[in-house]
Amino acid sequence: MSKPVLKIIPLNEVTYEQFKKFLDSLDEERKTWSLDLQNNKNEKEFYKEYVLKLCGLVCLDDKKIISFCGIRDIQESPNIMEVSFVVKKEYQGNGIGTILLLEIENICKRYKSKCKYITAKHYKDNIASHKAFLKAKYEEWTIEKKLINSHGQSGYRKKETNDTGLDWKIKEIA
């Protein structure tokens, strides 16, 4: 049996219906993906935001979406972006998450000229995400690590939370 040929494309090259079908197909993955709709009311707004204002990538096996990776601005500091990704269970362990993280980083370097850091959060028991971030050269982000905003001020740091189930990663790309 031959390996599937996977293709990474921008989110705006798939329809909302394709993206929604992908989200609906997530079962176990949805429980471990730290997706919040990032102030959007529903998944359609989430899709539109990533297509119109932000950056999203999907990985396809034939025409079926098997993974999503997106990056969004952090309002507190224009030089920090937050990444989120998910890979369907049956495709995990093949490096797809790491490849998507590196592709998003390259996009940030090319088009988001002020982007200096990429941050991420994931559930501590999500070993696949933890490994993907480490393979993509992210490091653990402790609460003490402060970031310098675009005005040279030390003002942004990881949000303190009572949720001890979350783990944070960070990567400097500038």
Image: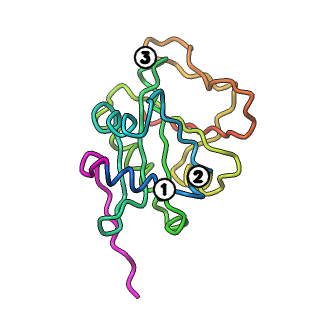
**Mark 1 — residue?**
97
Q: Position of residue 121 (x, y in %)?
A: 59, 39
**Looking at the rendering, in which quadrant would you find the N terminus?**
bottom left
Q: Position of residue 165 (x, y in %)?
A: 72, 40
Q: Position of residue 13 (x, y in %)?
A: 24, 50
Q: Which mark is residue 129?
A: 2
Q: Was residue 46 drawn as part of the magenta stretch in this picture?
A: no
> Dot 2, how many residues are within 10 Å of its Cα: few (below 14), some (14-19), or many (20+)?
many
Q: Who's the residue at 53% across and 41% down the image?
A: 35
The reply to whether discs 2 and 3 touch (Cβ–Cβ < 8 Å) is: no
Camera-side mark, 2 or 3:
2
The reply to whether discs 2 and 1 touch (Cβ–Cβ < 8 Å) is: yes
Q: Which residues are magenta?
A: 1-16
Please determine whether, in this image, residue 4 is positioned above or below residue 63: below
> Dot 1, how many residues are within 10 Å of its Cα: few (below 14), some (14-19), or many (20+)?
many
- The number of discs equals 3
Amino acid, disc 1: Gly
